[in-house]
Amino acid sequence: MIINIENLNFIYNIGTPFEKKALDDISISIEEGDFVGLIGHTGSGKSTLVQHLNGLIKPTSGKIIVDGVDITNPETKMKEIRKKVGLVFQYPEHQLFEETIYKDIAFGPKNLGLTEEEIELRVRDAMELVGLDYDTLKDRSPFEISGGQKRRVAIAGVIAMKPKVLILDEPTAGLDPKGRDDILDEIKKLYERENITIILVSHSMEDIARLANSILVMHKGKVIMHDKTREIFKSADLLEDIGLDIPQVTKFMKELKKRGHKVREDCLTIEEAKEELTKYLRGTKNA
Amino acid sequence: MENEIMINIENVSYEYKSYVDESIQLAVKDLSLEIKRGEFLAILGHNGSGKSTLAKMMNGMILPTRGEVYVNGINTKDEDKIWDIRSKAGMVFQNPDNQIVATIVEEDVAFGPENLGIPPEEIRKRVDDSLEAVGMSEYKKHAPHLLSGGQKQRVAIAGILAMEPDCIIFDEPTAMLDPSGRKEVMETIKKLNKDKNKTIVLITHYMDEAVMADRVMVLNEGENVLMGTPREIFTQVETLKKLGLDVPQVTELAYELRKEGFDIRKDCITIEELVEAI
């Protein structure tokens, strides 16, 4: 287990009339190397949970163990936590601040006290992983490149810390379909090559269906489901009740089955549905 | 005076200076378009294709470098008429937090009409009607910052409605919302078009939203490259992919199945249609 959360509670504005339970007794474990999708409607507690995971918020009660280290223990150094868990915020390009792309990505590793050679190596690697050309871009200003590229620079800055767990909070928000696909492909490549654990927060069920092995569903501060992606998307009604959805292609297969076609209803992607329908249609034709 | 053509765009170009090398760039290139009163038009295109620039020219927020834009027959270059134009064509943006100015929902909705110098009784009526139209009446005394994203966006829409525009331009209104927020906002937009006969221009990256429109225009490099009904547009799977755009998942599935040699009609754009086709 790379992450172990025990009875985590977080209450805002304790003792005031505005007291609100943002996280309600959460206990979950995440396996090392898993790709977890985190879904839930706005206000369900997703962001509060991920901010606990890299020590930005301290819990009201409960315990979080990441890679054997109790990050909720006040003795634990922030630096230790940041080395283990990297968090890419929503619209991370708003946080770029340095004169050059190189300096911006190097900022985190520099604070870890690494040597210049090691820092350069990490910046190079991180840029390559997110599809930015080191030689042509390293000395450019991060403010004169496109939105999609800015976001890559911001993600590279977190990757350069070499975290064991990478959390991405809606990394494709505001991007067009091509920009979205590019970033998702890079995340997939990163996951496959670096063997890290990824937690992806997203409102796009299609993106989650494409990438995540398992899904955490949050509702009103609780984790109400935690299972394999295919299992989770079987509960279409429950998901819709709490303001979520399933991919259009999954919805289509369900409808098809309801109308009496003997097909698998748990297809998650267009490729899977195509394979299933090809088999099914060929079968009925030959029969 | 009512014009049959709500917005008329004639040979419009928009130039700007690149801040990388100071060269002159064209965000919109010699584009012409007529938007009819009561029409629902969706505009698609990748980031940087000129969509937002075009939208901002539709209510005089920016003026074309070349060509003319007419809103309800008024040229947007006519400085004396700019407030007439703005009250005919309202705009709703991506981030609801940037559009809300007051600390109470009904005060926020009243902000626009107050600035138009409308009498208080009339403002009261407009605020109530607008909140009713977006389904937010019960929240009129609430603080906007405690609302969900979809609710905030509906308050922003009510604020525009209170100006009583004939046309509303939406620039990616659901980009920052969760699935239920998106649904709320899209249902509101559809209702404004069907029940209140508002002309709608919707810029979006979500193909399932564009499917609801009467017409879809695809922009690329500032040019109108495709125009037609959603069905005519989305069946051009390969062209759209080349332009960096999506098609609805069911349309893509139908396209893939045809490639495998199955005889499935290629113009399915909804779940229902593809189920029927199988």
Image (tube, coloured by chain):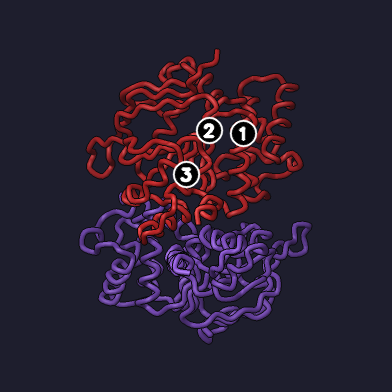
Chain colours: A purple, B red
Please report contact status of discs 2 and 1: CB closer than 8 Å, yes or no. yes
Q: Distance between the residues labelled 2 and 1?
A: 8 Å
Against A195, residue B202 (above or below) is: above
- Residue A235 is drawn in which quadrant? bottom right
> Please, which residue is most extreme toward the top here?
B1
The residue that mark 3 highlights is: B204
Q: What residue is at 63 percent from the left and 46 percent from the top? A: B184
Against A282, residue A18 (above or below) is: above
Let me know if marks 3 and 1 both belong to one chain: yes
| Residue B160 in the image, given as x and y percentages of width and height | 60, 32
Q: What residue is at 68 percent from the left and 32 percent from the top? A: B130
> Please, which residue is most extreme toward the front here?
A287
Identity, as a three-letter code, of the amino acid under mark 1: Leu
For this view, does B71 lie left or right of residue B20? right
Q: Which of marks 2 and 1 is nearer the N terminus?
A: 1
| Residue A126 in the image, given as x and y percentages of width and height | 32, 69
Secondary structure under badge 1?
helix
Identity, as a three-letter code, of the amino acid under mark 2: Ile
For this rendering, which residue is in front, A51 or A40?
A: A40
The residue that mark 2 highlights is: B200
Q: How far apart are marks 2 and 3 (CA)?
A: 12 Å
For this view, does A5 lie left or right of residue B274? right
Let me know if marks 2 and 1 both belong to one chain: yes
Tell me the chain of label 1. Answer: B
Q: What residue is at 72 percent from the left and 65 percent from the top? A: A21
Tell me the chain of label 3. Answer: B
Tell me the chain of label 2. Answer: B
| Residue B275 in the image, given as x and y percentages of width and height | 54, 55
The residue that mark 1 highlights is: B192
